[in-house]
Amino acid sequence: MASQGKKTSQAPAPQGLVSSDSPEQSWDEAAEDLMSGAEVEQRELTATTEHHGQRADKVLALGVSEFSRSYLQQLLADGAVTLNGKVLSKPSAKVSVGDLLRVEMRPTQQSMAFQPEEMDLQVVYEDDDLLIINKPAGLVVHPAPGNWTGTLLNGLLARDEKARQVPRAGIVHRLDKDTSGLMVVARNRSTMDALIKMIAARDVSRQYLAIAHKDWGSRKHREVSAPIGRDPRNRLRMAVVDLNLHPGKQARTDFDLLDGDATHSLVRCTLHTGRTHQIRVHMASLGHSLIADTLYGGQQEGGLERQALHAFRLAFEHPVSKKPLVLYAPLPQDMAAALDLWGLRYNSPESL
């Protein structure tokens, strides 16, 4: 296959390129070198006999193999690839000897997402190896379709030059967009690797406060051990699933009633695993959907417009100094106001 590179029009260049697919995956150095330039390169690929009859996207991947497949797929989706002068709308189209593929190596939405953006982040702890953020409700953690900018990752890139040296700006776990509370962020690769292993080994204690519908009943402590997977009836949701019938992973959450009345329950939730939407799914499975968690059957009440869930306590052994860290985040104003409205009591987090 013959290949030529041409420089074309200028375009903004993304900074700190890191894939959002996996904590371990980063963009190729070649892609970063290309995207850091002020101009966009255009490649021309002429199919030879060995490529005759192959899919166009496969030929493209072979011709510009220094770039990740996810980046090339984005270019295809953005109409940046032509076959014999026409936009390649079907990546599965077969090529013939002499066919000309032309690709404009432009920044994609995904690659442009990893830009520093100034934002006011509430840092409750910081040292040379890690920091702990109190994330507000409404802040998305990672860039993704529909939220390519304005995420915690963007804020971390602007706040800390070290964030550019580690995948995902050092983020090692997530909170849902509308869940508030504590998150730990690594500031170097060795700390990130250590924290990932600690979370997998369940050596990081994470506790949440939730306000749920209905009277909790007389049994104040409950343990839920139920696998969670994609809801087979609604792919936008997660659900407790039968592993004999549907894919999923084991999940365990402990719940303790702190206060309640005939229609509301304030509950402390302790995670033993970290599945997507775990607390929300397990609470719903008990018949106690979170207030305002409309995805899992909750209703908006007491001025709450987002799921009433807050990560209030984070505890672990510092991966470098080995000192115990125990951090707390006060209940956010919207949840505190709802408790006041319903006459429910909440003590200081240190007493829980």
Image (cartoon, rainbow, N blue to C red):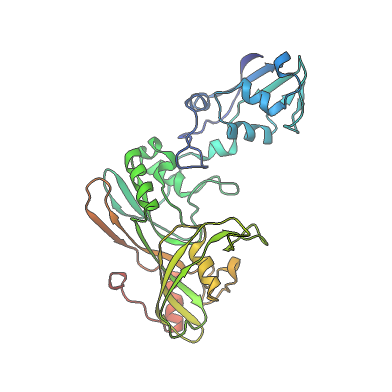
Disc tally is: 0
| Residue 284 image position (x, y, % from top left) | 55, 71
| Residue 141 image position (x, y, % from top left) | 48, 51
Quadrant, the N terminus? top right
Vertical comparison of 331 with 339: above or below: above
Task: Please give the name of the residue rendered at 39% of the width and 43% of the height, measured from the top-left corner.
Answer: 170
Vertical comparison of 175 with 340: above or below: above
Task: Please give the name of the residue rendered at 30% of the width and 56% of the height, measured from the top-left corner.
Answer: 316
Task: Please give the name of the residue rendered at 36% of the width and 77% of the height, measured from the top-left corner.
Answer: 346
Camera-nearest residue between 266 and 41? 266
Residue 81 visible, this angle: no
- In screen coordinates, is 335 left or right of 234? left
Camera-nearest residue between 84 and 215? 215
Vertical comparison of 101 with 240: above or below: above
- In screen coordinates, is 339 left or right of 58? left
| Residue 180 image position (x, y, % from top left) | 44, 61
Quadrant, the C terminus? bottom left
Q: Quadrant of residue 242?
A: bottom right
**Which residue is the extreme one toward the front?**
244
Camera-nearest residue between 167 and 218? 218
Task: Please give the name of the residue rendered at 56% of the width and 73% of the height, measured from the top-left corner.
Answer: 300
| Residue 15 image position (x, y, % from top left) | 47, 34
- In screen coordinates, is 167 left or right of 75? left
